[in-house]
Image: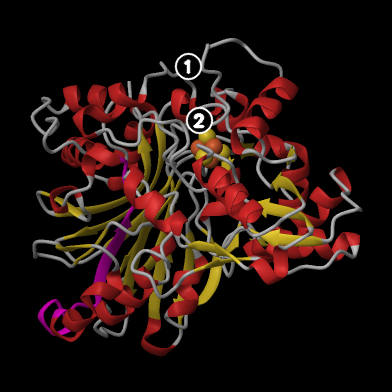
């Protein structure tokens, strides 16, 4: 199970009931989802091959006008891609087209090889491996057997293990959006009054970017169809259990987005306040965030304890890689390049006991680099606090924590460690004087959702919400030949 590249990313679907060309809106929406995928992007309209480009959406800005004219359509879907290593090619960029249906996917289908067997296995070769393509083939075959998209999804959701938010566009011009029954990945619905446009997207930041108003979350297990007849909703799964990804709230989502009713910026600030109650380091001189996602939590922490907050670490936005997010870069060297451009300000740090706050500690490399940089800048003592609980297991539902052996919490001699021993091992390896992690309960409280409606599988190893016991694999087994960055600790956090 799960030995192929995963599809995570951000998706969008736009339909104008007044017939306006939605391509410019689709592009703007994708730009507002750029934090969910930096590798490639694409758009699809009915009866055309999808347009796909490598890199950031903004890198293709010189083409926007031409694309808007050439692909002019009142209906479109789009995708920004963040993949694991093996699938980082234009061929695997999305949307993908199967017969008369184009598909964009955010999530992971962990048993793609089993689904592939159901469609003859022909779509699933090591060279063009994509769980989305496999699911799309299966969906198209289920639609042709059962007539309806909702019925097809109600069958497919029982066959698939993993998570999904899909947007589809069919050659008859309808846009569809579907969210998995447990709501692992986020999806929202909005409306723009001018031009009578409905828009579905991974996050509400995309709605704000096009001037649309957030109507509501797409419900887990819901299928939306938007066509000339208007907006229609169908529930294809009535499962009551929820497993909203907790990592979205601390790291992945845009701070301006509203997710499951909670604004991300406000939530992160609240997480910082709650972290202050858990770890009140009152003799600290300064609270410093690791840019960028940890900034609101650091502010919340500092305000709660009345300690000075300052930007002691800055990302160099003028360097080529500086503005990017390192965790979602697929290659070790690229992640390191991004981390290299986080620079300490000696005048702020020198001689101080610094509490440095980060949103997560995954592989540990960037934490190690940051501690080193703070020491070089003269920090007297470094206490590191992490707003997410210790990540000890891989994610099988859409985030790239691909193998246990890469995680900072992985014991090199494979000994079972207690939580305290694990924290001490990580503290030692990153070189901080103190290391404290948030708890799942604290995090859920700050988000305002019951802990049992959120997924914490990567920090508990309890995969019940996926309904499977994953077979853990090494990085090499999971990534094939393109593996790089073999040392544990190659990313943000
Ligand atoms: S395992 Fe972790 S990263 Fe993956 S969906 Fe669950 S909470 Fe999110």
The residue located at (70%, 54%) in the rendering is: 356
Q: Is residue 61 above or below residue 256?
A: below
Q: How is the image coloured?
A: secondary structure
Give the residue number, with chain letter if any, for mark 2: 407
Residue 182 is at least partly visible in this image: no
Provide residue 104's location: percent of width, then percent of height: 28, 53
Please say whether residue 410 is one of the residues in the magenta stretch. Answer: no
* Picture mark count: 2
Q: Quadrant of the rendered structure where residue 137 is?
A: top left
State the SS at label 2: loop
Mark sitting earlier along the chain (1/2) = 2
The magenta stretch spans which residues? 67-84
Left/right placement of residue 403 relative to residue 423 reads left
Q: Nearer the viewer, residue 338 or 252?
A: 338
Q: Is residue 188 above or below residue 246?
A: below
Give the residue number, with chain letter if any, for mark 1: 469
State the SS at label 1: loop
Left/right placement of residue 421 relative to residue 471 reads right
């Amino acid at each position: 199970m799960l030995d192929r590249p995963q599809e995570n990313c951000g998706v969008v679907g736009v339909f104008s009931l007044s017939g306006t060309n939605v391509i410019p809106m689709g592009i703007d929406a994708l730009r507002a989802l750029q934090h969910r995928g930096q590798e490639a992007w694409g758009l699809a309209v009915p009866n055309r091959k999808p347009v796909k480009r490598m890199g950031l959406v903004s890198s293709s800005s010189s083409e926007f006008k031409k694309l808007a004219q050439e692909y002019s359509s009142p209906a479109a879907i789009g995708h920004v891609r963040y993949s694991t290593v093996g699938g980082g090619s234009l061929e695997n960029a999305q949307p993908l087209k199967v017969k008369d249906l184009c598909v964009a996917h955010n999530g992971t289908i962990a048993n793609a090889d089993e689904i592939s067997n159901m469609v003859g296995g022909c779509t699933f070769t090591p060279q063009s491996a994509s769980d989305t393509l496999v699911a799309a083939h299966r969906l198209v075959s289920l639609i042709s057997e059962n007539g309806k998209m909702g019925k097809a999804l109600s069958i497919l959701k029982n066959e698939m293990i993993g998570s999904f938010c899909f947007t589809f566009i069919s050659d008859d011009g309808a846009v569809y959006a579907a969210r998995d029954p447990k709501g692992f990945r986020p999806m929202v619905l909005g409306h723009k009054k001018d031009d009578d446009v409905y828009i579905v997207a991974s996050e509400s930041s995309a709605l704000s970017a096009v001037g649309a108003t957030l109507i509501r979350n797409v419900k887990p297990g819901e299928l939306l169809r938007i066509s000339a007849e208007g907006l229609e909703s169908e529930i294809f799964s009535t499962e009551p259990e929820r497993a909203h990804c907790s990592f979205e709230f601390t790291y992945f989502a845009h701070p301006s987005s509203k997710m499951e009713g909670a604004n991300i910026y406000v939530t992160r600030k609240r997480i910082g306040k709650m972290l202050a109650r858990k770890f009140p380091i009152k003799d600290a001189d300064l609270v410093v965030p690791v840019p960028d996602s940890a900034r609101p939590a650091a502010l919340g922490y500092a305000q709660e304890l009345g300690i000075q907050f300052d930007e002691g670490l800055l990302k160099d936005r003028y360097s080529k890689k500086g503005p990017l997010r390192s965790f979602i870069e697929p290659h070790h060297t690229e992640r390191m390049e991004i981390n290299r451009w986080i620079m300490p300000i000696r005048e702020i740090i020198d001689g101080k006991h610094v509490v440095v706050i980060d949103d997560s500690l995954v592989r540990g490399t960037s934490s190690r680099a940051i501690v080193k940089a703070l020491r070089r800048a003269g920090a007297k003592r470094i206490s590191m606090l992490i707003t997410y609980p210790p990540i000890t297991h891989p994610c099988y539902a859409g985030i790239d924590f691909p193998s246990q052996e890469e995680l900072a919490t992985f014991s090199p001699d494979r000994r079972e460690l207690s939580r305290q021993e694990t924290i001490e091992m990580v503290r030692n390896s990153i070189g901080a004087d103190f290391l404290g992690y948030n708890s799942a309960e604290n995090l859920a409280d700050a988000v305002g959702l019951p802990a049992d409606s959120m997924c914490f599988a990567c920090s508990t190893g309890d995969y019940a919400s996926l309904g499977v016991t994953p077979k853990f694999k090494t990085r090499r087994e999971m990534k094939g030949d393109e593996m790089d960055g073999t040392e544990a600790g190659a990313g943000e956090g």
